[in-house]
Amino acid sequence: MSDPSGSRTDPPGLPVAAVEAFLHEAVPGLLQGPLRASLTAGGRSNLTYVLEDGHGRWVLRRPPLGHVLASAHDMGREHRLLAALAPTEVPVPAPLVLADDQVIGAPFYVMDFAEGEVLRETPQLAALDAAQAEAVTTDLVRVLVRLHDLDPGAVGLGDLGRPAGYLDRQLSRWRRQLASSHSRDLPELDRLADRLEERVPTTQRHTIVHGDYRLDNVMVDVAGGRVRAVLDWEMATLGDPLADLASAVVWWQGTSGLDLPVAAVPADVAGWPGGDTLLAAYADRSGLDLAEMPWYLGFAYFKIAAIFEGIHYRSQQGLTVGEGFDRLGALVPPLVERGHAALPG
């Protein structure tokens, strides 16, 4: 179907006409008008587009352009996770259809559009009063605990990963990612990985882990102070829930003062609680012992630094889509420094 205005253009990485033809065949009756697409987030991880036909809205996810870790960006895995979690108390967008790489040259899936707001910019956070900020913070933790309380086998995800040895494998995985994205020597990043490997804690409970749980990866009903949908499941697996908690805390407070182009830092915004509030609320709701949190926080810094270094590598090759990626490489050394500081000794 063509655009009557003749002005439809393709966003980077998405031939809209091919997607439109596929949806007409795969989900008859879904589209009621010419399809348009816009890129909403991209380059840091999987590319996310909003699809519109003048009547409805949907979201499409595809892998990033260029260099990626071989085991990452599995569209079938994300689609499966959403389908398994949709009937549970963990709010997620319902998936509609999965496509292989024959349609646009890369696999992708389409899901429902979740109503709400992604709180990614400082002015958005500043617009909430203290009561609203507290309500959103409380629900963010509540939803994370609900995810970690799910029985993976009961929702059909018992084979999502190998939970035993999760932390050791995570360290190995991100060291491999660094090796495959090597463009400069970062001895302190290597030393941080060495320090983490010296004393890996014992996992208290194996659960479904999101892998990148943070405020700007959820859709929020601001007025109601509720999480409407958890997004971006590309790193989800079975593993240690405290890794999710530590990642959320580092994104919440640990990146303070770094002029992060990825997302606002809630703890830097007046009226928003600090990271300790997340830790206390999680400990109270989950019953887990947080005595080893310094290690998990050190690992969270290491993982984010490794991700940023991979983006720095792709940015140098011109394979990132969006703004701010050329600034992430400069943030790796201070993140590594904070990772070292988080560890005891």
Image: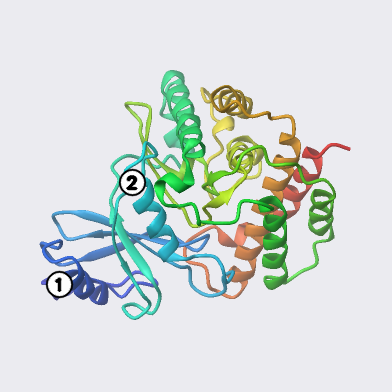
The residue located at (79%, 55%) in the rendering is: 193
- Quadrant into which the N terminus falls: bottom left
Image quadrant in which you'd find residue 59: bottom left
Q: Residue at x 63, y 58 (%)?
A: 308
Q: Counting other residues with Cα less than 10 Å from the Cα at mark 2, is it few (<14), some (14-19), or many (20 or more)?
A: some
Query: Exactly how many numbered labels are in the figure?
Result: 2
Q: Which mark is residue 86?
A: 2
SS of the residue under disc 1: loop
Asked whether disc 1 touches disc 2, contact meaning CB atoms under 8 Å apart, the reply is no
Q: Is residue 14 visible?
A: yes
The residue nearer to you, when weighing 16 against 157, is 157
Look at the numbered disc 2 and give the secondary structure of its residue. loop
Query: x, y percentage for residue 68?
Result: 56, 70
Query: Label 1 is placed on what type of residue?
Result: Asp
Residue type of the residue flagged with mark 2? Ala
Q: Is residue 331 visible?
A: no
